[in-house]
Amino acid sequence: MGLSEITKWTENVDRICVPIKDLTLRARVSAKTEEKKLELLYLRWKLERWQNARNRKANNDVLNLQETMDKELDTHRLEHGPKKRTIPSEYQKEIGEQYLANVEKELERWQNARNRRANNDVLNLQETMDKELDTHRLEHGPKKRIGLIHYYKILNLN
């Protein structure tokens, strides 16, 4: 993947309008974006370094340096290019783990919020029942207490 392709890829990732609902997918896309941006930054730095060396005053040392740098770049691309893309570096692994940890924290926070809402529903139900009981007492007065004697009379157990 060349420098221009990586630049286009990172610009396209920044323009994606579709919101990603799956948090693990979002974390993976973010990690991949971060990886590509770092790769792009490295390639830009390497290209700038190479151009700076080429644009210096032409003397034999610089010309030889240019040739050796060109050879270095070519050998580096041939040897390490595929390896770098297949084997993630420690930094990339760390970034991926951080994104996944953030996703887990976010999921836990959402679940805790959902549980709090459920508990609040129970508390709200209890409060409304208490209010209804208070309004019932205000409308009908306090509950009349009947003694045991009245119960015996009602049941005809005299």
Image (cartoon, rainbow, N blue to C red):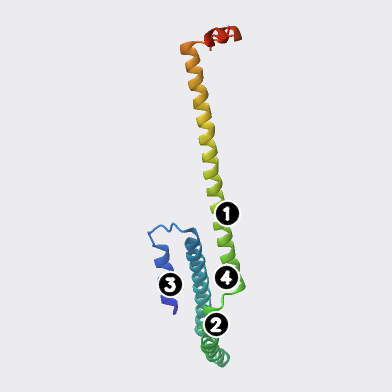
Task: Work out whether mark 3 precedes mark 2 in sequence or the reverse, and give the earlier one.
Answer: 3
Locate the C terminus and report the quarter of the image it occupies.
top right
Residue drawn at (51%, 74%) of the image? 39
Q: Nearer the viewer, mark 3 or mark 4?
A: 4
Q: Which residue is mark 1?
A: 105
> Mark 3 or 2, which is nearer the eye?
2
In the structure shown, which secondary structural element does the residue marked by tag 1 occupy?
helix
Q: Could you say where residue 43 lies in the image, as x and y percent from the top left? A: 50, 77
Amino acid type at image mark 1? Lys
Instruction: Report if the CB atoms under discs 3 and 2 are less than 8 Å apart.
Output: no
Mark 1 vs 2, N-terminal side:
2
Q: Which residue is mark 2?
A: 83
Q: In the image shown, does 147 or 127 lie closer to the viewer?
A: 147
Foreground pick, 14 / 62: 14
Q: Count the numbered circles shown.
A: 4
Q: Are marks 4 and 1 in contact (CB under 8 Å)?
A: no
Can residue 103 be seen by looking at this rendering?
Answer: yes
Identify the residue at image location x=60%, y=67%: 94
Report the amino acid beneath label 4: Gln
Name the disc covering residue 92, or none. Answer: 4
Q: Which residue is mark 3?
A: 7
Give the residue type that dot 3 points to: Thr
Query: Cα distance, mark 4 to mark 2?
Result: 14 Å
Q: Marks 3 and 4, how far apart in space?
A: 19 Å
